[in-house]
Amino acid sequence: MTGRYADCGTAHTDVPDGRGGLRQVAYLLPRPVPPARPTMIWHRVAADDRPDLITARYLGDPCAFWAVCDANRVLDPDELAAYEGALIAIPAPGV
């Protein structure tokens, strides 16, 4: 697995299966707060910005929005571009 949850461990638990038995399900363990990455640049949000477009522009990967979320301590990617004129930190890639 790559991305935001790549380094999270997994655990298993038993849950009722609805037929009187149990089934085992896997789940991700809590994700630790990542260490701060240096800010490469600040981006001022425009009216038509979206998280995937921002990260494609600066990091070359539209799926790397999670790195920008981490740099701005945001859980929901839509919060990054929610307010026109807001400044968001773009982390240095690969650091």
Image: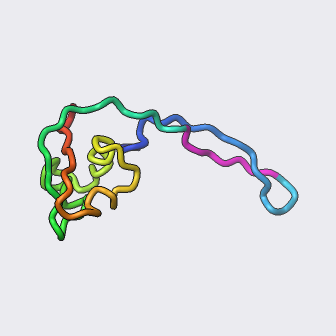
Residue 14 lies, in percent from the top left, at 75, 45
Residue projecting furthest to the right: 20
Give the magenta range. 22-29
Residue 78: which quarter of the image? Answer: bottom left
Residue 51, percent from left and from top = 25, 59
Scheme of colours in the image: rainbow
- Tell me if 55 is positioned left or right of 78 in this view: left
Q: Quadrant of the N terminus?
A: top left
Image quarter hosting the C terminus: top left
The x and y percentages for residue 18 are 81, 62
Q: Residue at x 33, y 42 (%)?
A: 70
The residue located at (66%, 40%) in the rendering is 12
Instruction: Give above or below for 82 relative to 59.
Output: below
Q: Which residue shows up at 27% across the image and 49% down it?
A: 64
Q: Say how many tags the image has.
A: 0
Relative horizontal placement of residue 68, taking residue 54 as reference (left or right): right
Q: What secondary structure is the stretch in magenta mostly built from? A: strand
Closer to the camera in the image, 92 or 13: 92
Point out residue 15 in the picture as x, y percentages from the top left corner: 75, 50
Residue 28 on the magenta segment: yes
Query: Which residue occupies 29% across, 31% down?
Result: 36
Name of the residue lying farthest toward the bottom: 48
79 sits left or right of 52 in the view: right
